[in-house]
Image (spheres, grey):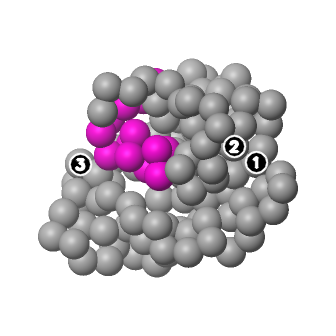
Amino acid sequence: MSQSTLTTGLEPKEVADIHYRAIQEGNHKLFVSTLCQELQDSVYNSYSQPDMWWRSAQRMRDLYGVSYEFAFARELGQSKAILFYQGKTAGGAAYGEQVPITLIRESGGWRVKQASY
C-alpha cells in the first residue's frame, strides 16, 4: 500500500480496516493517521497508549503472523462506532478472541479512539 495518510469521508469500518492493515504492512505513518487527534498528539511519546499499541501489534505480527478480519459491528452511531475484529494467524486460524475497536467522529472524519490486538 502506497497510502501514507487517511483520506476524509470514510466510514468507520473503512478506517478500522485501514488501521489494522497499516499494522500488518508496518506503515506507521498510516497507522497514526487513523488515530483521533488526542492520540496523534501523544503518539511519539515512548510508552504512550498508541506507542504501546504499535509495539504490541508489531510483535504479534512478527511472532505469529497475526492479521485482523472484520467480525461484526456492535454499535454504529452518529459520533461513535464499536466494531469487532478477529485475529488470524498466517495459516488462517483464529488467534485469540474477537477484539473491539472504538472510533469517534472528529472534524476530519472517523478516527480510532481505542483499539485492541
Tag in front: 1 or 3: 1
The amino acid on which the numbered mark 2 sits, given as a three-letter code, is Trp
Looking at the rendering, the stretch of residues picked out in magenta corresponds to 17-29
Q: Amino acid at mark 3?
A: Asp
10 Å neighbourhood of mark 2: few (<14), some, or many (≥20)? many
Mark pair 2, 3: CA separation: 28 Å
Expressed as whole percent of the image width and height from the top left, the position of residue 2 reads 32, 26
Q: Main secondary structure of the magenta part?
A: helix
Q: Can residue 48 be seen from the camera position used here?
A: no
Point out the tag, 1 or 3, that comes first from the N-terminus: 3
Q: Residue furthest front?
A: 9
Alpha-carbon span between mark 2 and mark 1? 6 Å
- Tell me if 30 is positioned left or right of 7 in this view: left
N-terminal of the two: label 2 or label 1? 1
Q: Residue at x 58, y 37 (%)?
A: 34
Please check the rendered image and state whether residue 28 is part of the magenta-colored stretch, yes or no. Answer: yes
- Tell me: residue 105, above or below residue 67: above
Asked whether residue 84 is drawn in magenta, I would say no
Callout 3 crowding tier (Cα within 10 Å): few <14, some 14–19, many ≥20: few
Q: Are marks 2 and 1 in contact (CB under 8 Å)?
A: yes
**Residue 43, located in which quarter of the rendered image?**
top right
Q: Secondary structure at mark 1?
A: strand
In this view, 24 is above or below 44: below
Per the image, the residue denoted by label 3 is 62
Cβ–Cβ under 8 Å for marks 1 and 3: no
Name the residue furthest right.
78
User: Which residue is labeled 2 in the image?
Assistant: 110
* Residue 58 pos. (x, y %): 35, 44
Specify the label residue 104 is tagged with: 1
**Image quadrant of residue 102?**
bottom right
The local secondary structure at tag 2 comes to strand
Q: Nearer the viewer, residue 10 or 63?
A: 10
